[in-house]
Image (cartoon, rainbow, N blue to C red):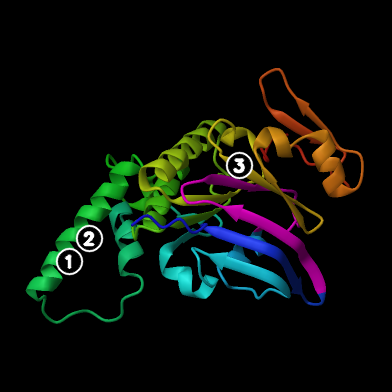
Amino acid sequence: MIDTAPAVRLAGAHVRIGGREILGDVSLTIEPGEFVAVLGPNGAGKSTLMRAILGLVPLAGGTVDVLGTAPQRARGSVGYLPQRQSFDRQTRVRGVDLVQLGLDGARWGVPLALTANARRRRTVERERVRQVIELVGASAYATRALGELSGGEQQRLLIAAALVRRPRLLILDEPLDSLDLPNQAAVAGLVRRISSAENVAVLLVAHDVNPLLGYLDRVVYLAAGRALAGEVEDVITAPELSALYGTQIEVLRTSDGRLVVVGQPEAPHHHGHRHDH
């Protein structure tokens, strides 16, 4: 039976932290298998939205359902990759071991002896680890130490670890951060393939929509604690963002197809590579 419940549904959601409203009257629906980017300037509430969906911060008003139930009850079906971790050159943990931890992390203790059922389970798990490593394109280097790998290679293995328990919702918090432009585009394409192959809804927090263009189903743009959701062409426009911010915003498209948002009330934010100078 195919579950048709939305992966995420927020209706009139409000989040207040320390007496300050971080999100106000946010409503959005994300369907199974959709690849959705969450965009917006620093301080707009992107990470707070992710935490509300994970059930880590309470709502001050409105409702949030994840996979048809309360966020806390859905956690076993949600894969989560927090903001980018870095592994120094001395990290000797192998990539395959990192992915295996995605399965073993919830277990306590070490079995004294493996029963026949446990051995069968381990065989199934090893096959799943191999499968997701292949899916993210990391088979060639998964047995190497993480400290020997590039940032893009590490990120693929981190995504595999979040994916290994077959989540129905995958939340990736700024997985493109600190990657160069070719690796950003490669990871974006990878996430699109994962969304389709595993029929998993993906919420990806990003500062820059450009590496994601062509892969997304929809975007959620946050500003001033409010959210605007829809297709890229419908959301990131001068009229829509001007209404969202309550001030005049311009959206320009460069000759190479990249988007530039001009005139935001905060420090001007360029939808380009965040480390450009």
Badge 2 amino acid: Glu
Sequence-first disc among 3 and 1: 1
Badge 1 amino acid: Arg
Magenta stretch: residue 25 in it?
yes
Farthest left residue? 116
Badge 3 amino acid: Arg
In the rendered image, which quarter is residue 240 located in? top right
Left or right: 39 as drawn, with respect to 78: right
Left or right: 219 as drawn, with respect to 189: right
Task: Give the residue at mark 1.
Answer: 121
* Horizontal and vertical percent position of residue 192: 46, 39
Q: Residues within 10 Å of mark 3 (few under 14, many from 20)?
A: many
Report if the CB atoms under discs 3 and 2 are less than 8 Å apart. no
* Horizontal and vertical percent position of residue 77: 42, 64
- Quick one: SS at disc 2? helix
Q: Can residue 272 be seen here?
A: no
Task: Give the residue at mark 2.
Answer: 125
Name the foreground residue: 22 vs 233: 233
The residue located at (86%, 45%) in the rendering is 243
The residue located at (35%, 63%) in the rendering is 102
In the rendered image, which quarter is residue 193 located in? top left
Farthest top residue? 255
**Quadrant of the frame with the C terminus:** top right
Name the foreground residue: 26 vs 256: 26
Distance from Cα at disc 2 to Cα at disc 1: 6 Å
* Horizontal and vertical percent position of residue 6: 52, 57
Report if the CB atoms under discs 2 and 1 are less than 8 Å apart. yes
Q: Give the range drawn in magenta.
A: 20-46
Given this view, does label 3 or label 1 mark the residue nearer the observer? 3
Numbered circle sitting on residue 218: 3
- Numbered disc total: 3
- Quick one: SS at disc 3? strand
